[in-house]
Image (spheres, rainbow, N blue to C red):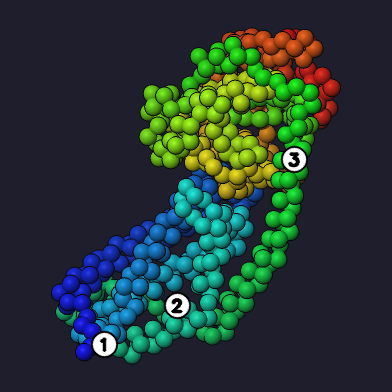
Amino acid sequence: MMKRQPEEQDLSLDISRDLAALQAIVEGVDALRLAMVEAQQQIGGRQRGYLLPDEDDTIRRLYRGYRNYRIALFEIIDRHVAFDTREEPHLRARGFLLAFGAAVSVYCTSRMLVNTYRDIPIIRRKLNEPDPVYDLEVDLFEQIYQSLTSLHNLSRLRDAVALYEMKRDDLHALSAALDPAWEGLFSRIDRQYPVLKQHDLDRLRERVQRGWDDWRRRASRPFAEVAYQMTTLLMDTFGNIWVGDRPRIPVEHQQAFRDLMQPGDFFIVRPERKSSTVVLPGWWTHCALYHGGTDQLAACGALDLPHVRLGRNALSQPINDEPVSILEALAAGVVLNPMSVSLGVDHAVAIRPRLSHEQRLAALDDAFGHLGKPYDFEMDFTRTDRLVCTEIIYRGFHGKGPIRFTPVKRYGRPTLSADDIAAYIIQGQTEPDPPFDLIAISKRNLKRGASRFYTGEDAWRLFRQIHRTRQQLPSKPTTSGEPTAAN
C-alpha cells in the first residue's frame, strides 16, 4: 500500500502558518534592506580604514538579522520542497509557491548583501569574522557568495522559474482564487523572480568573478596565518620574560584601589622589566577593566546583563584562592583575573569614565561580550574576533557619553596604545566636560624599591608629569624607566 500523506487538515494548517511566517519574513527583509543601504551610506570606515565600535555593532546586528531571516526561509523551503508528493492539487500548488517564494527571497536578499559589501574590503573582512556573541561562523560571507553563484543552485532556480511561468495560471486558480491571502505572495514573486532569468553569460561572469575572489583570498590566507602564528609564538615566548624579580603593586595599595574603584573603572599600568615593554609603544603599556567581581556586579545591576550573564561561571571561579575582579586581554586571550595578578607591575593608575549609570552598564556588557576571544598579536583594530588589551577599553567605552577615542596608524594599521589612552585622558581635562576622572596612582621608585600612593591633585600632577616627560624621551624606555625624579 502507498504510504499515506499527512492529514490534509494538519498540512493545511502548516501551510497557512508558513504563509504568515513568509509574509512576516519578507516584510522584515524589506526593512533590513533599507537599513543596510542606510548603514552603507553612514559608515565612514571605508575612508577611515577601520570601523568604530558602534559601526561594528551595526554591521554585525544587521548581518545577524539577515542570517536569521535566511535560516527561516530555508526552513520553509525544506518543509515544502517535496510539494510534488502531495495528493491534493491545491496542496501541491501551495507547497510549490511557498518553496519558490522563499527561494526567490533568499536569492534576492543574498544578492543584495553581496552586491552591497563585496567591493568594500573592510566590511567584507568583518562579515567573514567569526563571532560567538552573534553566533556568526567564520567565512559566512564567502559561503553566501559561493551559494549565490553556484551553477547547481542557479540551474535549480531556473527550472523553478520555468515551472512557475508555465503553471502560473493554474497555481493562481488553486491558491489565490480560493484564498486572497496568497495574492500578496503572487505579487511579490512576480516582482522579484525576473532577476533569476539572468543571461547565461552574466551567470558565467559572476561565477568567474567569485572564483577569482575566492582564489585570491585562499592564496593569501596561508601566508597571513603563518605570519600570525609566528608572531604569536614569538610574542608568547619572548614577550612574557621578566628581567629580574617580578614586581607587584603593594598589597595595601591594591586594597586602596579596591576601596576607591567601582565596576566600569579601569587600570593603565607599566611593568618596567617585562620584555614586551620594550616593543610596545609608549610609557604606559597595558590596560585592564575593573569589574569588581560577582558581588559588585550584582550590586550595580550588571550581573544579569546578557554578556555578563554568559560569564557567570568564570566569575565564580577564584584564581589562587582570590576572587576575580579584572577583565583583560593577555597572550592567553581575553580572560578574568584577580587584582593581584593584573597588578603584577611597577606602576598603575586607576581611571573612571564619566558616564551615567546606564552607560556604565552598557560598557560593562560590551566588554564582557569579548570574554574568551584570542589575543591579537598583530594589533589590528579592524578585527573584533581577536583583541589586544586596549581594545577592551576602546570597544567598551567609545561613543558612550563624551568618550571618543581616535586610533593612531602604526605599521600600516589603526591602533590605540595604553599611552594613547593616557594622552587622551590628559587632553580631555581641557574640555568643558572631561571624559575621565583620575582615581589614584601607585608609583614605584625603582632606585629605592618603594612605592607611593597618590590621589586627588597629587595624582593628577604626577600623571601629567609622566606624560610631559614621556614626550621628551627617546622611543625606547630608559635604563631606569623613571620618567621623573619626583617620587
Cβ–Cβ under 8 Å for marks 1 and 3: no
Residue 361, x across and y down, in percent: 43, 31
- Which residue is tagged 1? 169
- Which residue is tagged 2? 195
SS at circle 1: helix
Q: Residues within 10 Å of mark 2 (few under 14, many from 20)?
A: few
Q: Nearer the viewer, residue 230 or 439?
A: 230
Q: Residue at x 60, y 63 (%)?
A: 119
- Along the horizontal axis of the image, is 268 left or right of 355? right
Q: Earlier in the sequence, mark 1 or mark 3?
A: 1
Which amino acid lies under the numbered mark 2 shown in the image of this protein?
Val
Cβ–Cβ under 8 Å for marks 2 and 3: no
Q: Residue at x 61, y 26 (%)?
A: 341
Residue depth check, mark 2 versus mark 3: number of the one nearer the observer: 3
Residue 389, x across and y down, in percent: 62, 35
Which amino acid lies under the numbered mark 3 shown in the image of this protein?
Thr
- Along the horizontal axis of the image, is 242 left or right of 117? right
Q: Earlier in the sequence, mark 2 or mark 3?
A: 2
Q: Residues within 10 Å of mark 1 (few under 14, many from 20)?
A: few
User: Considering the image in quadrants, where does the C terminus appear?
Assistant: top right
Q: Nearer the viewer, residue 425 or 20?
A: 20
Q: Is residue 290 above or below residue 74?
A: above
- Which residue is tagged 3? 237
